[in-house]
Structures are given as C-alpha cells and as structure tokens.
Amino acid sequence: MDFGYSEEQVLFSNSLQKLLSDSYSVDVRRKLVAEGPGYSEDIWKAYAEMGLLALPFPEDMGGLDGTSVDAMVVAIELGRHLALEPYIPTVIMAGGALKLAGSDAQKSDLIEKIISGDLKMAVGLTEPGSRFDMAEVSTRAAADGDDYILSGVKSVVLGGDVADKIIVSARTSGETRSEDGLTLFIVDADADGVTREGYALLDGRGGADITLENVRITPSAVLGTVGQAWVIMEQVADQAAAALCAESLGAFARVNELTLEYLKIREQFGQPIGKFQVLQHHMADMLIEYENAQSLVYRSSMMADSDDAAMRGKAVSSTKVYLGERGHTSCQSAIQMHGGIGMTAEYELGDFVKRMAVAEVMFGDVDHHLARFGKLSYMSG
Amino acid sequence: MDFGYSEEQVLFSNSLQKLLSDSYSVDVRRKLVAEGPGYSEDIWKAYAEMGLLALPFPEDMGGLDGTSVDAMVVAIELGRHLALEPYIPTVIMAGGALKLAGSDAQKSDLIEKIISGDLKMAVGLTEPGSRFDMAEVSTRAAADGDDYILSGVKSVVLGGDVADKIIVSARTSGETRSEDGLTLFIVDADADGVTREGYALLDGRGGADITLENVRITPSAVLGTVGQAWVIMEQVADQAAAALCAESLGAFARVNELTLEYLKIREQFGQPIGKFQVLQHHMADMLIEYENAQSLVYRSSMMADSDDAAMRGKAVSSTKVYLGERGHTSCQSAIQMHGGIGMTAEYELGDFVKRMAVAEVMFGDVDHHLARFGKLSYMSG
Amino acid sequence: MDLNYSAEDEAFRLEVRSFLENKFPKDIGERAKAGIRFKKDDYYRWHKALNEQGWVAPHWPTEHGGTNWTPVQSNIFDEECFAAGTPRQLPFGTRLVGPVIIHFGNDAQKERYLPTIRSGEEFWCQGFSEPGAGSDLASLKTRAVLEGDEWVVNGQKTWTTTAQYADWIFCLVRTNTDVKKQAGISFLLIDMKTPGISVRPILTIDGDVQINEVFLEDVRVPKENLVGEVDKGWTYAKFLLGNERTGIAGVGLCKNDLENLKTIARSERKNGKLLIEDPLFQARLSRAEIDLTALELTNMRMLFDIGDEGTPGAIASVLKIRGSELQQRFAELQMEATGSYALPWQQGALEPDWNGKAVGPAYAAARSPLYYDRRKTTIYGGSTEVQKNIITKAILEL
Amino acid sequence: MDLNYSAEDEAFRLEVRSFLENKFPKDIGERAKAGIRFKKDDYYRWHKALNEQGWVAPHWPTEHGGTNWTPVQSNIFDEECFAAGTPRQLPFGTRLVGPVIIHFGNDAQKERYLPTIRSGEEFWCQGFSEPGAGSDLASLKTRAVLEGDEWVVNGQKTWTTTAQYADWIFCLVRTNTDVKKQAGISFLLIDMKTPGISVRPILTIDGDVQINEVFLEDVRVPKENLVGEVDKGWTYAKFLLGNERTGIAGVGLCKNDLENLKTIARSERKNGKLLIEDPLFQARLSRAEIDLTALELTNMRMLFDIGDEGTPGAIASVLKIRGSELQQRFAELQMEATGSYALPWQQGALEPDWNGKAVGPAYAAARSPLYYDRRKTTIYGGSTEVQKNIITKAILEL
C-alpha cells in the first residue's frame, strides 16, 4: 500500500505545474475564452513536447505507457490551473477508445497524430433526451453495403467544438435502451452531413452538439466490433469521469486555498473574518470534504484502468457522487464566506466553482451515479 | 386568515397545562412507565372530567363538537408534558373511526363510555412486514354465516396494551396490497383467540402486537361497510398522524427550551457555552425549524378533518416529513450541545427526544410520507 | 385559527389579477418566464403602470399615496405579481429611500423627491456598502466634509445595484471621525449627474451586470440634501433596513420557481419516464415544496402577528434565512433537472435583443446563470450569518 | 501509488483470522452480532486471549511486550476483530495509562503496573472529566494535597466508563491553584478499593449503565503513585489523548454496521420488494457506504503518511469527526430500516442472561438503543466542535 506519487509522477506534475503557471495567467485564459478559440494552440504544442499527449499510449506507438494514475496526476494540475485544452476528450477518451478497440490501422493512423499534437478528437456518447443513459441511443447506423449511414444527434460533446474527428455511438441493432447493438464510429468533423454547433461550457471549455444527417461511414471508420460497443463505452466514460474528478479535485484545492486566504485577510468588525467560529468550522468542513474527496479520487483513478466493470464502476461512481455533493456544497460555502467578492466574475473563485460544476454533471450527475453505485452494490447479490 | 387560538382554546390549553404540570412530575411519569400500568388512571379520569375525552364527539352524544384544531391544542400540551395516556388511540383514532363509520348502535354503545373514561380503545392498521402500507393486509376475515372469523397479526398498535377494545382492519376480499376489500372490525381485547403482547415504546407509552387466531366477530362488531374501509382507514390515520405531529411539536418546544436554557447556564472556558458562535447558530437553526414546523402542524391540523383525501393527505404528509427530518436533526443538535448531560437518562431531554422519535415513525416514516406527498402532488396531473 | 382568506381578500386578489391582466405589459412577462434579462425600460413601464393604478407605494402613508393595504393584502399583491412574471419593483425609491424621507426628511425634501419617486421619473440606487464595509456596514469610510453650503464627498461605494440606471443615490457618509463609528454617519441624497461621480459596472458570476462600484471624488452636494440631522444617519439606515423585511421571504418568487421546476421535470426524461416520476428527484422536489409551504405559512403567521403595527421582530430574520435558502434551492433544482444542457454558457440567449437559437430546450439557457445569481441571496441584505447573529441576540438572548 | 496490501500484510491478515477463529470465544461474538451487551467477563476473556497470543499491547515498546506492528498491520488487526465481533478491547489500561507509565513513569511503577495491565488481572478506568470540566478539561477541580507521604484527594469525576469494573483509576488532580490552570495539574494512580471512593452508575439514554460518577472523599493515595513530576500532569494527559487516535475513525466498527444494515435491508420489505431495492433507502445506503470508503482510505493515507513515527497530526481530527458521524449514521440507518419494530423499548432483550422472546425480528430490539448510544461518539474524546477548533488552529491557522 502506497499513497505517494512516484518520482516520475512528481517530476511530471512539477513540470506541468510550471508550464501552466508560467504561460496560463487568468487574463490569458479569459481572453482565450472570450475571443476564441477557447484553448491555446501553443500550450497544446507544449503538452505534446513534454509528452503529455503520449501519456497513455503503448511505448511501441511512441507513447509513455502511462496508467490512469498518471492521467490523474496530469488532470489534477489541469484542474488546478483551469487549463482549457481538450486533453480529456482527445487523449483520455478518444485515445482510450482507440487503445481498447482500435484496429492496428486505426491506431497507427491516429495515435501518432494525437501524440504529435496534430489531431484533436472527441467522443460523443449521449443524446438530447437520453439524460445520462449511454444505452439510450437513437442515432441509427444503417448498413449500406459495407458502409454505414449515420443519422442522429450527439449532445454536449466535450471538446466537440474543435475536434478534427469525433467518435460517436450509434445503434446498429436492438431496442433504443438496450446495451446490445451499439457500435462506435469515427466521424470526420467536416464530413458531409455533419453539423456542429459549438459553444463554451460554463467553465469556458468548449463543447458541441453534433448533428449527423445521412453521414456515410466506410468500414475503416468502424471502431471495434459491430454491436458490441457497450463495454468500451462504459470503460471510456469511466476513465473520462475519473479524469474529470481529478481535475475537479485540483480545482477544489484552489477553492479551499482561496477561501482560507480570504478568511485571513478580509477584516470586518475589527478582525479577520477567520476569527469567527462559524466560519472557522465551515472552513474545517471544507477541509474534511477535500481530504475525503482526495482519497476517492486516488481510488477511482487507480481503478479506472481495470476491466472489472463492476469494481471500476463502483469506484468511479463513488467519486462522482462524493465530489458532486460535497464538492458542490463546499463551493457554496466558499462563495458564501467570500460574500460579495465571491459573486464577482473578476475574482477567480467563480472559475474554479464552475469547473467543478461541469465535472459534476458531465458523464452523469449525482443521481445517475448514485443509482449506478446502488445497482452494482446491492442488486446483484 | 387567523393564526391565533380561540378564547375557548386558550382556556382549554391552560387548564390542561395546569392539570399536567400539577400532577405529572418527571418522577411520577417515570414510575408509571417503570412499574406500570404505563399511564395514570387518575389523570385519565381527570381528562374525562375536563371534557377532554368528549372533545371530538357531536354534542347530541355528550361531546363538545371539537375540531381537529381543538385536538391539536390538546395534543401540543400532551406532548409538552409527555403525558402517557392513550388519548390518541382512544379518542382520536377509535373515536374518529366510530364517528366516521359507526352505526347508531355502535356509537351510542361506545362513545358514551369513551367520554366517561370507562372505555379505552386502540386501532390496529399495520402488520409485521407491511411496513407502513395500510393496504398490505394479510389478516383474513372469512365469512361464516353472518359472522366473520379473523386471523392475523396487527403490529405495534399504539395503546393496544391497555385497550378494552381494538378496531382492526382485515381483508374480506381482494389481493394482499389492494385498497379494496378491507373491512374494520371491533374486537374485544379479551375475546377468544386474541393474544396481545404489550410493551412500552421507547417514549414510555404503551403499544402491543395483537395476534388474532380464529376470532369470531358478530355482525354488530363490523364497523362501516364491508370491503370499503380504506377511506376510513386513511382518514383515521391522517387524524392520528396530525395529532402525533402536534404532540411532537409540544415536545420540540421543550427540547428547544431545555437546550437554550442549558446554553445559558453551562460554563466552559470561562463563559457560558452559549457565547460560542457555532452553538448560537445551531440554536438559531433549531428555532427556525421549530417555527416552520409549527406552521405545518397548524396547517395539517386544520386539514385533518377534511374529507378531501388528497388535500388532507398532502398536508399531513408534509408535516410528517418536515418534523421527521428537521425535528430529528434538531434533537440531535440538542443532545450534541448538551454534551455528556444530554446522554444521561436522568436528565429530561432524552424523554422529549424519544417522544419525537415515536411520532416520526408511527403511522409512516419520512420516506413513506415523502412518497405519498410526491404521488399526490405530481403523479396525477 | 383559520387558514382561509377572507372574502375581502379574495375580492382583492381578483382586483389585482384583473389589473395585471390588463395593465402589465405582456412582453415583459414572457421574457421573465424565459429567464431573459429585464431592460431599464421594463422596470420603468412596470413602475408607470403601478403608479397609474395608485399602487406604486402601497406602504406609504395615504397622504403621500399609500394604499392602506393589510399585510395579507400586500402579500396577495406580491404573489400575484410573481405569478404574472412582473419585474421586481426596484425597491430603492419607494421601498427604501421614500419612507426615510417621509419619516425623517423635511417638507422641502418631501416635495422635491416623493413625486418623482412615485412617478418613476427619477430612479434611485443605494450607496451603503463599501469595499471594506460589508457585513460590518458601520465601518464605512466615505467622507463628507462641509465646505460652505456644500458637502464635499470622497470615497467609494460598491455592490450598488442598478447604479447604471439611477438618477439619484442615497448614501451613508462619515461626517464625524471623532466618535464611535455608528455615531459619525449621515444620510445624504446625491444627484448621480454631479461631477466627480463615476460608475464602474461589476460583472458577476451569473454573467450579468447589475451591480456597480460608484466612485465619489470631490463630489459637491448641496447642504440641504442631508436628511434629518447630521451624524444621525445610522438611525435612519436601521429604520430603512427594518423596512426591507416585507416580502423578504420571497414566497412569490419561489412559487413561480416551483412552477418552472415542475415544467422542466415534466419535460425531461429519465430511464424512459418523466423526470418528475423519478423517486430521487421527486423526493427532492417534494422536500422543497414542503419547505416552501412551511415558509409561506410562517410568513403569514408573521404578518398576522404584527398586524397593523408594521414592525416585524427578529422573526423576520427567520424568513430571510429560510427564504433565501429556498430561492437558492429552487434555482439549484432547476439546474439539476435540466441535466447536461445546463452546461452550455449561453449568455447571449439571455439578452433581450438576442435573435439566435439556444442550444437544448428553451428553458436551458437561463438555468446556470440563475443558479449562480441566486448565490447572492444569502449574502445581501444581511447575510445568513448576520441574520443568525440577530436571532442570537434578539430572540435567543445568548 | 498502490491501494493493494503487500503480501506480508495479507499473510498477517490470515494469521489474525486464524487466531480469531481459534481463540476468540464464539459465544461472545454471537452476542455481539445480536447487539447483546457485554459482561465484564467477556472483556476479561478477550483480554486474556490476546495476552496469551502476545497481542494485548501491540503498540508498546517491544521490551514491554509490544509487537512492532506497522500502522497498516494494526489497522488490519482492528478490521478483523470487528468483523469477528470481538468486544472493543477496553483502552484504559493498554492504550491509555500504559503508554503514560512507560514514557513518564519510574521503574518501580513500570514493574508494578505493566504486568497486570498486560495480564488483565487489574482493570483500569479514566478519571479526567468532571461535572464542570468537560470540553474545558483543564478547569478540573478535584484537589490533591500532600500530607506526609500521602496525597489526600477530594473531588468528583464523571463520565467514567466501566468504573464499576475497574481496580484502578488514573486521575488528573489539581495540585497547585496558584498557577495557570493547565500548570497545576498532576497525574495520579489510585486504587479503587481505597476508602473514600464511591461509584454511582449513570443510566444513559440508550438504557445502559456503562458510565459512572466517581466521588473521592479524603482519599489517601501513597505519594509514589504520582506519575512523572508534580504539576506536569497536563503534559501527560495531552500525550495520552494523542495516543487515543489510532482506530479513532472506527472503520472496522462501521464496516460491521454496514453488513448488519444490509442484512436488515434485505429482510425488510417495502411495497412488495426488498427494502434494499427501494430507491430512496438505497440512495442513503449508497451514500453511507461511499462515505465509509472515503473514510477508510483517508485513514489509510494518514497511517501511510505518519509511517513509523506514530504521531498523527491534526488530521486525526478529520478522522474523528467523520468517523464518529458515520458511526452515528449507520446506527441511524439501521433504526430507520427496522421500521415500526424499532419503537418497542426492549431493554431486557439486550441483557446477556435474558431468556424471553423479543418482539418483531431478532435484529429489532437493539436498534434504538444503539442509535441513542452512538449519540455519544461526537461528544466524547473531544467533541466535534472541539475537533473543529483543533483543525482551525493546527491546520488552518486561523
């Protein structure tokens, strides 16, 4: 049993921290959001240079053979510094799906480009009206000779606004809410019949709704076994959720730091407000929540690679539930203790709060993961 | 709109308060619980003398024609003073059932005796394993000529330990969980085939499990229309729950009073502990909960007489939910702020806390009433 | 004890409804329902309609245009307005500075200011809070020094709601530094067009610009603009804050929210059923509705208890605390109910002049902004912590 | 980073299991599972079994009989014991006074007391709290005055757990009234058979009698029973309280509770289905289990961080707060799950010698008593409020 970072992880974490602190000021970030493109191409290149984009891939493809824990180390820093780049959709999600299900041709074609920073990708697994149930897929893939013709809509696709290629789920057979009969397809963002409506999410990162209208897909763009995508989808979504939770933990750390600092400097009634016992205890609660959230983030990151779907699902859903509830209330306390200043957009607190809010909802909200945890824990025995 | 007591209610409340303060000390109460019979026959007689037992009955039967609000005024005092007598089972529940469904013969036979204090009754509507669903009735009433033969078990019957007669629900037709096919029967506690296992509940009041084994019931003891008891059962249970909530409110008032007083007298670190801001705010929370609980108790008591089952049910379930959750946490705060002394049985706080705990569970716990409220509010439209 | 409205009250409710039906501009109500932001003109048109009806300052003495409504009637009026989606009547003129002028101002001030407050010709804003004086309002530092016939004012105010629309600002200013901090404060009326005043809007986390910083640099204010006596401003400020209480619970607002929430929960689907049928969501919805019912009744009880005297006790703090929490809760539940489509940050869609197409269902765009905006409710008007301190002192006597 | 136990640890776990399988009296375990109260003899038999195994005081230095377990091993040991339903090893001898004697006692004291603590021949209790000194322990008033070779002790202790079983009590006594309150306290070992000591049991709201008042009236204690230096007792007390931390989270206890809770929720039915399948109940159960998982890992992280140094920081307060809350939560959920049959107050059914038939299902009788008993967990050993004050000072530095 060991809860520390390895030496490599410490190095990685430190150099990423340095990169982001040096190049990613509040003003730079806000300008990227306000004026586009919503992330920094320079920093994306820097990620590529430091090997961040190669992290999870096998060494023989030029990767670093990193684990989900390595991804967590990265994600914590991305969250801490509110980095905007589509790391999770490109590297964790699309990269993960390719690793798990890609053909040799697909891997050699795409992974190298991801590693070099020349390819951004996204993965669309949910639809309008399906809420967080990835099995409720109305997008149809109709066979047409060896090709498939895709029609449907994918909603709130993280990184979908800037992705060059988007992996989408579509139904090749089965009833609308069945886990069977789902297939993944790699779609070019500029293919005929693809429309995307890009937007900023509330934390400034990009997302998109992707509409597919009779989009023709050749066999080479079918990812994995036809009709058997569910297992891959679940694992990719779990890895993405674990990484988002790690980002959220990084943001949480900053929420607590900012609040604690404010309690020390803000004076009212002739003393720092941190002298008021009620605020002290609220701050202590936030510390308790953070420590416990950290434990769960460690655990879900350690389990995100596992192909034991039940174990992995329970671990990831636990973390999503915990951060979704306790991180949420901690953010509310943080704003409350800041008072008026916490309501202003100029002050940075709100940015961290919104980052955590996105992590709370994306890939399933608290209720979704609570039900999933319950099902996995109590309904089988 | 008027939120005050009427003059009569003020008088009634004051005289009951005086009776209970004068004759019902902590020691007297505890002795009655520890040594039996679990209530005071003298005080029961005093209730009869002051008209308490006549409260809800029509004037032409010797009653006072009181409303559920009058019952609330009484119940608040009973709760405040932790009175042990089976007022709710006898007067509110059995009395209510007789008023609603009794034949003239049953009324003239029984109500007079209730009013005079010579008859105690109870009503058994739930069974082991049925949780709080009164429609889940396994007790069977088989027709045998004009008679019925009853077999089954009624669980945790409030006041069932000392009742002379017990009104029970039994199934004369229909499936186990159907609201149709239920009938009420008036059973003599000492009839052949009736066994009762009496016990004290955790607040010291009496309850019993009633086992019926081939108990013969003559037609004169059938209460109301055969197979149509559901409407009566619901209304009786709502009136009982409303009265229990009013009792709970009375106990809640004392919990707050005791705690506030303790915060003022208990010194630690050289000052009254009520000087610590965290405890001040917890006490403020308890006050807020109490004020809101009071509003809901007023409302459910005002609606408990209504035969609009949906309106009444929503009002009563609201109060059960609110007191069941907020009263519950307030009790926990109260013990916490008392520290060690709050854990001792000698100190009176625990008695009030337990009274509220019984009111929380009896006639349906929070989840039961939450689901009922939801169904009545959102599932019909 | 009787929870029903009297016949008179019911008749009054119908009168209010009919007024709203006929006189409240429909386009404003529709924008309100959709969560679109109000323009200054919306506030003004609503104010004008109220004034024409004689209902613009119901709580003022009748000789100044008040209506003599009972507290229950005021409450009915608020409820109906919220149900119809009217803008909140900006409180600064009629609700806040008006009563101060009526009670403490001289005849000249009453003649000068009350008519334009009623007519809406002049809008007001409130200059109380400062960067260093929030919960601890009395520590304010903005200085006013008498030079001849003018007060020369220097300092900074902040969190000044709708200052960008305002013609006048009423300010607490420090006129004496040699005494206890509460004892050296005066109450000054300042024309926003006076040289030396500049307004800097503050963007808030909900993406809106409603509050401002107001900078005062050698602002020269005629001597006669001081209300009441010099150095007695703290008394007037307390009087003013005490008047802020009616409607503090926000029951009407929450009822409107509840309806929106139910609409969303009947539109969204989960596991093939309506979200409103989902046991977990339904339980949360039920709890919020039960809390709201309790709050409404507690509010009524308070109105009943204070009767015509008009000065609610510290129990108003109970209403402020619970009301503000519920306003937050309903915003939160609406955001939750909306699911993923609460994530796109569609500021444009909330502007009155926007012509684009929003992402997701129509109700989605305004849900996150509303959630973040509502965080302020437990901060402003005396934070929850301050309210609990008031309860501690005034009710619990700890 | 690695969440798995090492092979050594796994082997150790098997060793513990085998010991429990063979040496822990089965009848005690069965009573524990049913919520029946332990007798003094139960504690003694368990203590004896541990002593025979050499595991009675694992955290003592090896020369005094310690085992040199790693923190992770200690944790494994605790977990397995809870799973087997052992009584809590009474902490007063081995866990509390033992280390004080080892660190601050003289050789004579070590020789006199350590062997009987290990063997269990002599039971100890703790005389710290007083009626006026709870959270504010240093304000204790029990006086010890030196007369010749004896300390004469007068005062009263309270909340003294299992004093009725104890042969010895270790007391904090005031030996100097002229100095700051913390500076005038000494640490005294007192034979419970000494004339002048009387014990009055306190019935608690769970219906049990585990705690006591201890009255000391002219109790004469040999001079050599003072540990360390006179007036330095506060230092030793702080050392002792710091040692109370391991196992403070109660993870093993909660895991056991979780299993009981699941058993109940699989027995109870609601709406024709198992209670465990009910969405609202299941959500609460899930949250509690998730909280427990988080606590367990946080506990592990703490053990890992402190390594062999053995002095956890203020982070132990985090574990105490969350652990005690969860212990309460699991008791509460068990009571809730039991439904109506949690209401009959069946004290008799919890006594070891009872032969009657309990009302309702077998698990019902102990559920309310457990709920009320657990209210103490956030009070004793430094209340939640005191722990948050510690966090405020030591970690947050506010």
Image (cartoon, coloured by chain):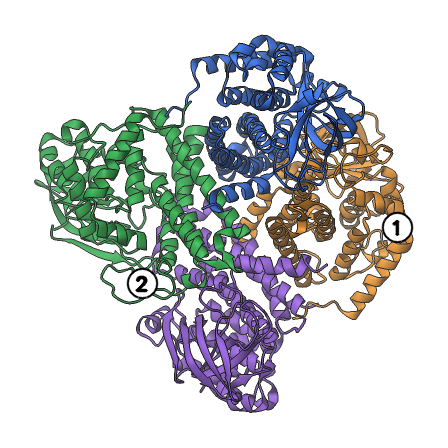
Chain colours: A purple, B blue, C green, D orange
Bin the neighbour count of mark 1 within 10 Å (Cα to Cα): few under 14, some 14-19, many 20 and up.
Answer: many
Q: Quadrant of residue C109?
A: top left
Residue D286 in the figure: left or right of residue C266:
right
Where is residue C332? Give x, y as percent.
43, 52
> On the image, numbered disc 1 is attached to which residue?
D24
> Helix or strand or loop: what does disc 1 sit on?
loop
- Amino acid type of the residue that numbered disc 1 sits on in the rendered structure: Phe
Q: Is residue D101 above or below residue A12?
A: above
- Amino acid type of the residue that numbered disc 2 sits on in the rendered structure: Gln
> On the image, numbered disc 2 is attached to which residue?
C347
Work out whether residue A150 or residue D352 is closer to the camera in this orientation and state it.
Answer: A150
Where is residue D269? Give x, y as percent.
69, 45
Share a chain, discs 2 and 1? no
Where is residue C22? Give x, y as percent.
19, 43
Residue B381 in the figure: left or right of residue B179:
left
Report the residue that reaches farthest toward the top.
B49
Work out whether residue B179 or residue A91 is closer to the camera in this orientation and state it.
Answer: B179
Does residue D166 appear in the picture of this structure?
yes
Rendered-image quadrant of the N terminus of chain D:
bottom right
> Helix or strand or loop: what does disc 2 sit on?
loop
Report the chain holding disc 1: D
Work out whether residue B216 or residue D171 is closer to the camera in this orientation and state it.
Answer: B216
